[in-house]
Image: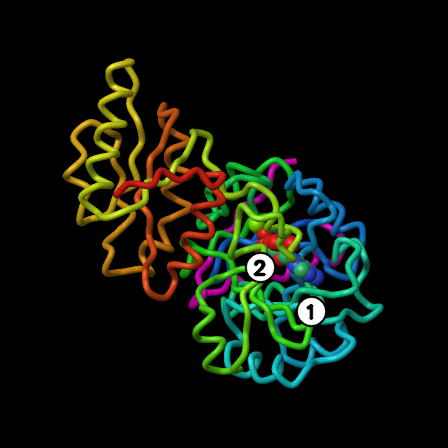
Amino acid sequence: MKAEVVSMTADNLDMEAIRRGGDILKQGGLVAFPTETVYGLGGDALNPQASMKIYAAKGRPSDNPLIVHIAEFDKLAPIVAEVPEKAKILAEKYWPGPLTMILPKSDLVPQETTGGLDSVAVRFPSDRIAQELIKAAGGYVAAPSANTSGRPSPTTAQHVEEDLGEAIEMIIDGGQVGIGLESTIVDFTEDVPVVLRPGYISLEMLQETLGDVRMDKGLIAADSKVRPKAPGMKYRHYAPKADLAIVEGPEEAVVKKINELAAEAKAHGEQVGIIATDETKDRYPEGLVVSIGSRKEEETIAHHLYEVLRDFDQSAVRSIYSEAFYTPRMGQAIMNRLLKAAGHKIIQVV
Ligand code: AMP
Ligand code: MG
């Protein structure tokens, strides 16, 4: 099977194609579509066979639950057992948007969709193409990121085609996504809300709205024995084909260290990849240098991260060294993904 690719924009929706996409989903097929975070691989969330197809297409372990996407507020109640007051407040503030909430599930949601858990992850995306497709599919679309499991998440329809072009029926090309990192996941199944995955909406923003919010212990100490509560966060993820390591420390020391590593590799006849910023990119004479953006624009850094990692897959480099990006608001989310991509390989310099 080769996926049909249809192009449209949020301002110029192709409603006929969306209706066809909706029909494919209703019949248990798979359609990839843009959201404001990354591209999603959609299947009917209430159809266990569709969820199984999603796991198979991505090569994703089936104990790693899927996020159910809705496009109307009143679609939430039927799929959950209850909505705690704090979840209502957050939904009002951040939906539609890059926020996923974990809530106790109702019987309507099959175990296949939730990886056997009694809770369900729900998100109401703001992307208009996504919203129309979800409505056309009957209201509930399970959609993980539309990449092969383990690879960087897709931020363009071309990325989706690379990974899944042969495995699904349709890809809706809505151009580059806006944010470029997956949604913030907040778990409401315990007394205090817990962030299971950082994203565009930061811990501080959540605390401002809700008061007490915690970070999952398994996220804070990556090398500890504590398992992350979101099953998906325990897997190596977002990884380019080359070996990636992060060089951390004061800027001068980082540039010096990466240059030493690049010179060493050159002596062995190899070139390394370097993930730099606009501020440092001209200071690495030996490597294959890519600027991820300016340190002053953290949204650009977030937006480019997966694309940069994927682009190195087209090159011959076997090692990549990246600067660290602890930016003020999205730094937590950016570094969470970068550290996972690097399998937590960090070179500390002083
Ligand atoms: P993706 O589908 O690629 O955006 O990843 C979804 C993430 O949400 C994975 O890390 C899942 O493990 C996590 N997730 C989905 N549903 C649940 C749930 N019910 N409880 C905890 N984590 C969940
Ligand atoms: Mg994913």
Outermost residue on the top side: it is: 268
First along the sequence among labels 1 and 2? 1
Q: Give the range drawn in magenta.
A: 1-29
How far apart, in angstroms, are the residues tagged by discs 1 and 2?
34 Å
- The residue pinned by badge 2 equals 217
Dot 1 alpha-carbon crowd within 10 angstroms: few under 14, some 14 to 19, many 20 or more: many
Residue 349 falls left or right of residue 67: left
Q: Which of 257 and 31 is in front in this view?
A: 257
Which numbered disc covers residue 71? none
Q: Nearer the viewer, residue 14 or 90?
A: 90
Residue 238, image x, y percentages: 50, 43
In the image, what residue occupies the spot 64% across and 41% down?
A: 58
Q: What element carries label 1?
A: loop
Q: Nearer the viewer, residue 237 or 79?
A: 237
In the image, what residue occupies the spot 25% across and 26% down?
A: 262
Residue 20 lies within the magenta run: yes
- The residue pinned by badge 1 equals 139
Residue 83 visible in the picture: yes
Which quarter of the rendering shows the C terminus?
A: top left
Residue 111 falls left or right of residue 97: right
